[in-house]
Amino acid sequence: MTPEEERRRSIFAREIIENPLWNETITLIRNRLMEMWQHSDWEQTKERENVYQLYNAVNLIQSEIETTLKTGKMAEMQLEDRQWLRSN
């Protein structure tokens, strides 16, 4: 992927991360999953494992969006460096 593409993707990632609805939804899902886990019986190992996997999946989605944002920031710096080198 080119730095320009990474920069564009980071703009989308920022829009998602800064979106109040996104943040409310992620928080709500995490809280519901945690409540499901906390209110399950210790014998319900399969159900507890499923909740654990879902919780980790939500965290993975958030992490991937944050990584896209960081990658885009690095691409932006790279593009700025290239532009500076061309102008000097």
Image (cartoon, helix red, strand yellow):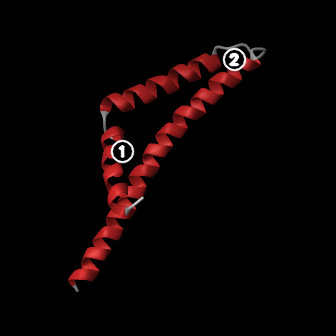
| Residue 87 spot, x, y in % from top left | 21, 82
Q: Earlier in the sequence, mark 1 or mark 2?
A: 1
Compare residues 27 and 79 and report the one nearer the observer: 79
Q: Amino acid at mark 2?
A: Glu
Q: Amino acid at mark 1?
A: Ala
- Residue lying at the far right in this picture: please name it: 43
Q: Residue at x 64, y 20 (%)?
A: 37
Compare residues 25 and 88 and report the one nearer the observer: 88
Q: Residue at x 42, y 58 (%)?
A: 1
- Residue lying at the far front in this picture: please name it: 1
Q: Is residue 13 above or below residue 20?
A: below
Q: Is residue 5 left or right of residue 83?
A: right
| Residue placed under numbered mark 1 in the picture | 13
User: In which quadrant of the rendered image does the C terminus lie?
Assistant: bottom left
Res 53 → quadrant: top right
Q: Is residue 42 above or below residue 25?
A: above
* Residue 63 badge: none
Res 81 → quadrant: bottom left
Q: Residue at x 59, y 34 (%)?
A: 56
Q: Is residue 78 above or below residue 88?
A: above
| Residue 4 spot, x, y in % from top left | 32, 60
Compare residues 4 and 65 and report the one nearer the observer: 4
| Residue placed under numbered mark 2 in the picture | 47
